[in-house]
Image (cartoon, rainbow, N blue to C red):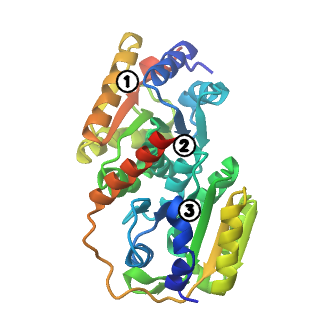
Amino acid sequence: MPVSVANSRLIYEGLKECDVRLVSALPETWLVHLIRMSDEDPEMTLVRLAKEEEGVGISAGAHFAGVKSAMLMQNHGFLAAINGIVSFAHLYKIPLMMLISYRGSMGERDPWQTQGGNVTEPLLRALGIPYFFLAAAEDVKKRMRQAQMLAESSLQPVALLLMRDLMWEE
Amino acid sequence: MLRIDCLRSIYAELENCLVVTIMGATAAELQSLGHRQNFFYLQHAMGLASSTGLGLALSLPEQRVVVFDGDGSLLMNLGSLSTMARYRPKNLIHVVFDNESLLSVGGFPTATGTGTDLEGIAKASGIPRVVTARTVETFTSAMSEALGGSDLTTIIAKVEAKGPAVYVTDLALLENRFQFRRHIQSLKLKH
């Protein structure tokens, strides 16, 4: 599977440098190494979800507890989490650091991913969620720190879109 | 059995717990007994009260966490039962007030009124301790046991579809949210 181990490692190191202690996740091809790294790290609490919206509640609970968290999901998982984002994270000003694999964009081979790819950015904009692309290895850690900083200072969800150029090697 | 009587019977014991409630009648009734800084009322996002409790319980393993859920809310997020069971936090008590109704929005019947069995679903999801209470006495003893025990517990409390006269209070959502977090941070400083 040509998911980049090196760049997954870089993102994982970025999470650690952001002092993230809890990660919620649902499996998706591009996220396999990140989920494995979370699982193998004794300092990380990995919560494997049934549905991504649960992750909003879990991250809110962690925030109340003073624990920094991140959510790993595919863009279709972001779609599945939207009510929670609006009626919990936005309503109650909860910082969320969402790492979203951007499937269905240029270069996508799987037909079933393509519709979600079309609507990901329009939805982020409609919801007023600030987002960054993670496409180049040299930007990853800096952009993760900046995204977390904004989430914590503005008390709102932010998105880091994991791009094909970063995640996929072929 | 009335939900308010259940809440009243264990109100004193909630003092040292972190409490998360669902919206509507449950939030209003608990608040009517006296708001405390360790109570968080999730006034929307149906289904996520149990997930919030899970996030708290996993992040603060020394702290007892109590969630007051409802049948309508839980039915929106049944996957939460399997996620809670998977991580099995010993400090989490999940109470479901099952009135077989979406009371706060007009009393429409939920599927627990037509045969859906939340106790069975919780057990089959892997929740290690599941109790159904139909009297206040059973409820109180189930709660005491859970508060004194050391395993993840779901208590299904079968209550009448009756709520308070008013649902809105003068506690702003954000006031509640910031107060709740500040309270938890002050607890951590004491330890």
Q: Quadrant of residue B174?
A: bottom left
- Contact? badges 3 and 1 (CB < 8 Å): no
Q: Is residue A10 left or right of residue B150?
A: left
Q: Which residue is mark 3?
A: B66
Give the residue furthest to the front.
Answer: B190
Chain containing the residue with disc 1: A
Work out whether disc 1 and disc 2 sit on a shared chain: no
Q: Position of residue B179 (x, y in %)?
A: 34, 54
Question: Which quarter of the figure is the N terminus of chain A placed in?
Answer: top right
Kindly identify the residue that appears in the image at 67 percent across and 26 percent down: A40
Q: Position of residue B128 (x, y in %)?
A: 75, 60
Q: In front here: A93 or A165?
A: A93
Q: Which residue is mark 1?
A: A144
Which amino acid is tagged 2? Answer: Ser
Which amino acid is tagged 1? Answer: Met
Q: Residue B59 bears which disc, if any?
A: 2
Kindly identify the residue that appears in the image at 35 percent across and 14 percent down: A139
